[in-house]
Image (cartoon, grey):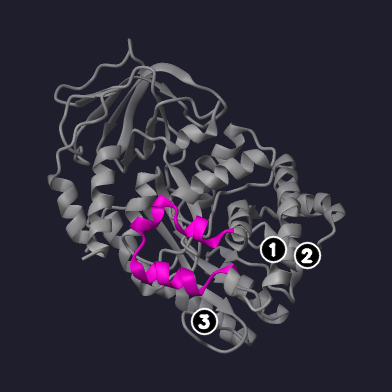
Amino acid sequence: MLLGVCFLFLCLAVPLPGCVHDSGSGPARSDEAVAFIGVNVVPMDSERVLPDQTVIVRDGLISAMGPSTAITVPAGARRIEAKDRYLMPGLSDFHIHLHSDEQLLSYLAHGVTTVFELNGTPRHLKLREQIARRQVLGPRLYTSSPLMDGGPEGGSVVSVNSPEQARQAVVRQKREGYDAIKVYDNVPPGVYEQLVATAREQKLPVMGHVPRRVGVDAVLRARQAFISHGIEYFLAGSRDESRIPGFALGTKAAGTTVVPDLSHVHTSLKMMEDLEGVFSDPEARYLSPKVMSDWRYSNPTRRVDVRQFSERQRAAYPFVQHLTLSLQKAGVRLVLGTNASDAGLFPGKTVHLELAELVRAGLSPYEALVTSTRNPAAFIEEHVDPAARFGTVAVGQHADLLLLPGNPLEDVGQAGQALGVMVRGQWLTREHLQRLRDKVAESFNR
């Protein structure tokens, strides 16, 4: 179905909103030169705005950028007059679970141009290649291995109950082409040590949870590359907030990247208070019936320990807020992730909830936006692909861009109001994406 939607995308011709003049019609081809003229650039290399710039995109890259008076627009380029608008890098969500392919459009519609799947399957490997080859329209996709855990094999879980099992499993995931190793709750201590050592030999970052019997301190000593929830410090470390400064210093020393994932805790509490209110969000129409059915049967209200879980989440929320600000002040690399599309977490939209939660925790709008732009790119450059070029607006970078009506450094909510999205040099207006999503929603009702 998704390929059919992508074909429709190539055929539609919908003008931009009246507030921005576009010399072309329909979506720009990836090989078409595009010029954003008179735009205010938010480059995200530092907290600044470059006023009245012209940005030239060619062959998927930013080929020129500078004051509008100094940049010549190539003959035949598509011209987007963007005076008083703001151009920033596309956003990233580095903790997703892509349960159905049509969710890719939801990410783009909300300005998310790069995602990291954290429970990969062969389907995700194939989709990663289809997106890279422009056979499927979607954000740039990275994917971890299937989750590795102690205990029995089952579903997508890779069982690792001995050091040798862990060694073989990591080597196999490397051979199959995954970008990282996903570790889960019940990996035993000795097995964990072998898993991390083999992953390091194979040049794969270890991402995921803090195994409960290993604990936060040992995970930091092992220099696990990425902790996928701030709540892991609460669950596998200590519920005593007096330990947070030590956690922050230890995380910085380990060079570990952390996903605060405040929106996950926030949404779990909302679901326990008003499940139907969460599920009736307008975004629900873009989820497949199967995903909505899964949400009905797999959400916090269905837990046998719902009262204890509610109490735990209520205690965890202020802890993770405090932790997030302490990690930020300690210089830890924070990266935005949402856990979408687990129950209540809408693909794409939850990114903007997380940005708001980060600001609520004490980060500035700029600091919050760094977690979804420059920091994800830095993680990829360090651990996955040294040649990755995204996360900032600069000459030579991939043209993953958002055109906004207002300044996101003043109001982080502006990042959720994109007039258009450019992904790998392909310009998509808000209206184009909305029509594609409407077609997806209509297909669910047939």
User: Where is 128 relative to 332, above or below?
Assistant: below
Please count the marks in the image.
Answer: 3
Q: Name the residue under label 1.
A: 232
* Label annotation for residue 237: 2
Can residue 130 be spotted in the picture? Answer: yes
Q: Which of marks 2 and 3 is in front?
A: 2
Q: Residue, x 63% and y 71% (percent of image)?
A: 196
In reply to whether residue 185 is colored magenta, the answer given is: no
Tell me whether circle 2 and circle 1 mark residues in contact (CB < 8 Å): yes
Residue type at numbered disc 3 = Val
Q: Position of residue 61 (x, y in %)?
A: 32, 37
Residue occupying the far bottom of the picture: 152
Question: Viewed as shown, does residue 3 lie left or right of 278?
Answer: left
* Label annotation for residue 158: 3
Residue type at numbered disc 2 = Gly
> Over which residues does the magenta segment extend?
274-300
Question: Who is closer to the viewer here, 261 or 30?
Answer: 261
Residue 27 falls in image quadrant: top left
Q: Residue, x 62% and y 54% (percent of image)?
A: 266
Q: What element carries label 2?
A: loop
Q: Is mark 3 on a helix, strand or loop?
A: strand
Q: Earlier in the sequence, mark 2 or mark 3?
A: 3
